[in-house]
Image (cartoon, rainbow, N blue to C red):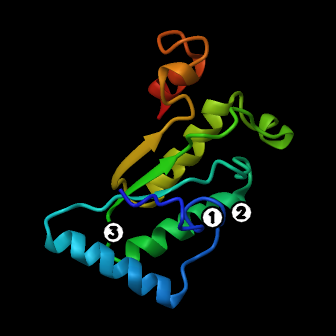
Amino acid sequence: MYAPKDDLKHRAFWRDLYTVEEAEQLSSLISAAKESAIQLIYALSPGLDISYSSAKDVVCLKRKLEQVSQFGCNAFALLFDDIEPEISESDKEVFQSFASAQVSVSNEVYQSLGQPRFLFCPTEYCTSRAVPNVQNSEYLNTIGRTL
């Protein structure tokens, strides 16, 4: 999985497309993985500042993953780990919950990309983050039912 924290365009600047030079480097990595019979999964972590109800943010997310798809990548991940489990007031007007906001965006992106191999990392990704616990987490149950 390609999800390096030192690639600022993976998390902090996830909306920004790769430059020509960055695109060439990422294309080379994807090609090298294929030559070694490894499927590279390209991941984005938009959770720090995404507005789930913003059509513009959803377009940016799709555009970024479509750009990477043009480099030869055919597997993707959206990572929503290590963020606060809250949505903005404008998102609350559109979505019933934090989980439903993430699911809506993820499902739309998945369909837009033609239903590729697609991974999702939830915000409640381990026992210590599950509220009140894994079995009774409304967040995880919503993800499980609707993603």
Which residue lies under the disc numbered 1? Answer: 59
Say whether marks 2 and 3 touch (CB < 8 Å): no
Q: Residues within 10 Å of mark 2 (few under 14, many from 20)?
A: few
Which residue lies under the disc numbered 3? Answer: 73
In terms of secondary structure, where does tag 3 sit?
loop
In terms of secondary structure, where does tag 2 sit?
helix
Say whether marks 1 and 3 touch (CB < 8 Å): no
**Figure quadrant of residue 142:** top right
Image spot of residue 87 (x, y percent)? 75, 37
Q: Is residue 40 left or right of residue 106?
A: left
Name the outermost residue toward the front: 6
Question: Which circle marks residue 25 in the picture?
Answer: none
Q: Is residue 109 left or right of residue 94?
A: left
Which one is nearer the viewer's eye here, 119 or 3? 3
In terms of secondary structure, where does tag 1 sit?
helix
Q: CA distance from mark 1 to mark 3?
A: 19 Å
Image spot of residue 34 (x, y percent)? 19, 70
The mark that comes first in sequence, 1 or 3, is: 1
The mark that comes first in sequence, 2 or 3, is: 2
Q: Is residue 109 above or below residue 21?
A: above
Q: Amino acid at mark 2?
A: Lys
Q: CA distance from mark 1 to mark 2?
A: 5 Å
Which residue lies under the disc numbered 2? Answer: 56
- Which residue is at 54% across, 12% downward? 133
Q: Is residue 49 above or below residue 74?
A: above
Say whether marks 1 and 2 touch (CB < 8 Å): yes
Looking at the rendering, in which quadrant would you find the N terminus?
A: bottom left
**Figure quadrant of residue 93:** top right
